[in-house]
Amino acid sequence: MYRNVSISWTEQVKWVSEMSSSRSPTRSQGERARSFDGEAKRMCWAKAETVPGRHPERWRKDSAGNILCKRLFNCQGCLCFEYDHIIPFSKGGESIAENCQILQTRVNRLKSNKDEIDVSRLKSYSCDIKFTVKELDVIEMAVYGDVLRPGKQCRCRTVAEMLGQYKSKDRTAPCKLPYADESL
């Protein structure tokens, strides 16, 4: 049976502070972290293969050669990715940068808890879509609002600019993207 106990505001704040600074009640002191921390994710992204002609902070390739977009994390599309344990967590793999790789979401889900899987097998799990340079420009424009790559830096024009009501002070040229009458 519960008793109605009154505690002061100071005691409540102290209790909440102690609870939030302690480890999660669902994880015991000896339990391993399942997710990669921010630094491990940063290092994992940095060690992945770059996409030639694309900004390395925006685009990378996974172990199967799939092009991935950094903003499309944890979704289901062909440019989406997840951070994967090379040695599966369920088989003792740690959540550290050295045991991390980026994989297209579909590839990661089909890889599941397999280890020692070869690249050809990973490729067989891929969406297997090859994007043209123009298609990646359109995607980058939609996702970031601009395109950053060697020899092609441009930005998205505002509606007011397109209507001739505003002249941008931004010296970066507006992107010329393909329209319906132009093929990708």
Image (cartoon, rainbow, N blue to C red):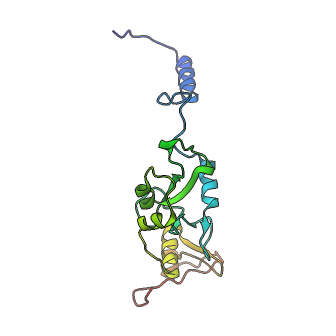
Does 183 sit left or right of 175 as displayed? Answer: left
What residue appears at the point 52 percent right and 61 percent down from the top-left corner?
71
What residue appears at the point 53 percent right and 49 percent down from the top-left corner?
87
Q: Which of 125/49 is in front?
A: 125
Q: Is residue 72 above or below residue 16?
A: below
Q: Quadrant of the C terminus?
A: bottom left
- How many numbered tags mark residues here? 0
Q: Which of 164/9 is in front?
A: 9
Residue 172 screen position, x and y as percent: 64, 77
Q: Is residue 160 visible?
A: no
Residue 177 screen position, x and y as percent: 50, 83
Say which quarter of the image contains residue 152: bottom right
Q: Is residue 117 above or below residue 87?
A: below
Q: Is residue 103 above or below residue 36?
A: below
Q: Is residue 69 visible?
A: yes
Residue 65 screen position, x and y as percent: 53, 69
Q: Which of 94/37 is in front?
A: 94
Residue 14 screen position, x and y as percent: 57, 21
Residue at far bottom of view: 181
Q: Quadrant of the N terminus?
A: top left
Does 148 sit left or right of 160 as displayed? Answer: right
Residue at far left of view: 1
